[in-house]
Amino acid sequence: MRVNTVSPVFVKETMEMMGMDSSSGLSAADTAKAYVAAIEGAMSGKTLDAPDYV
């Protein structure tokens, strides 16, 4: 069994819906790239930082 985790930052679209400044957020599409890498990659036991996969 492989276990990986993703450490996301605040999602821009959510921040905008909440009336927050979204300049420090990451889009949902870019955040999803880290999740895809966690599932499809060969690594195991890793924590993937979402901004690293943009």
Image (tube, rainbow, N blue to C red):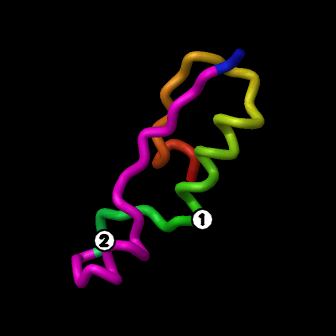
Residue type at tag 1: Ala
Magenta span has 12? yes
Residue type at tag 2: Ser
Question: Going 43% across and 62% down the picture, which residue do you hit?
Answer: 26
Quadrant in the picture for residue 23? bottom left
For disc 1, the neighbor class at 10 Å (few under 14, some 14 to 19, many from 20) is few
Considering every residue shown, the one lying at the far left of the view is 20
Magenta span has 44? no
Residue span colored magenta: 3-21
Residue 12 in picture, x, y percent from top left: 40, 71
CA distance for labels 1 and 2: 15 Å
- Relative side of 27 to 14, left or right: right
Where is 16 relative to 4, above or below?
A: below
- Relative side of 6 to 37, left or right: left
Question: Going 42% across and 48% down the picture, which residue do you hit?
Answer: 8
- Relative side of 5 to 24, left or right: right
Question: Going 57% across and 46% down the picture, which residue do you hit?
Answer: 53
